[in-house]
Image: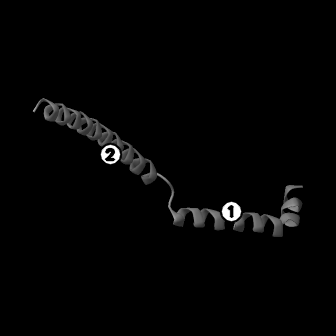
Amino acid sequence: MDALEKRFDKIETKFDSLQKDFGDVRIQIATLVERVAHLPGKGFIVTATISALALFSALMIFKEKIALLLG
């Protein structure tokens, strides 16, 4: 019975370690979920890119008229 108790104690120790590691993983996943929640969405990125392209295109098309206005 002494060998069985030692094996059981060893299993309990490993299980406790596994529970601690699992708790750490849960915290890390929660942190990642929170960080990802604050990232911009696909709609915002597409809108910002199209807006920037439209602005630069307009500047290129109207650059002569803008130069005349500025002096």
Q: In screen coordinates, is 40 left or right of 64? A: left
Give x and y (percent) for residue 31. 39, 44
Q: Amino acid at mark 2?
A: Arg
Q: Quadrant of residue 23?
A: top left
Residue drawn where x is 50% and y is 61% of the image: 41
Depth order, front residue of 60/50: 50
Front one among 37 and 31: 31
49 or 14, which lies in front? 14
Comparing 46 with 25, the one in front is 25
Name the residue beneath numbered marker 2. 26
Residue 25, picture quadrant: top left
Q: Which residue occupies 85% across, 56% down?
A: 70
x, y percent for residue 20 = 28, 37
Residue at position x 86%, y 66% from top? 65
Q: Residue at x 89, y 61 (%)?
A: 68
- The location of residue 11, given as percent across then percent down, is 22, 38
Q: Which badge, 2 or 1, is on the more N-terminal residue?
A: 2
The amino acid marked with disc number 1 is Ala
Q: Which residue was labeled with disc 1?
A: 52
Q: Is residue 61 above or below residue 15?
A: below
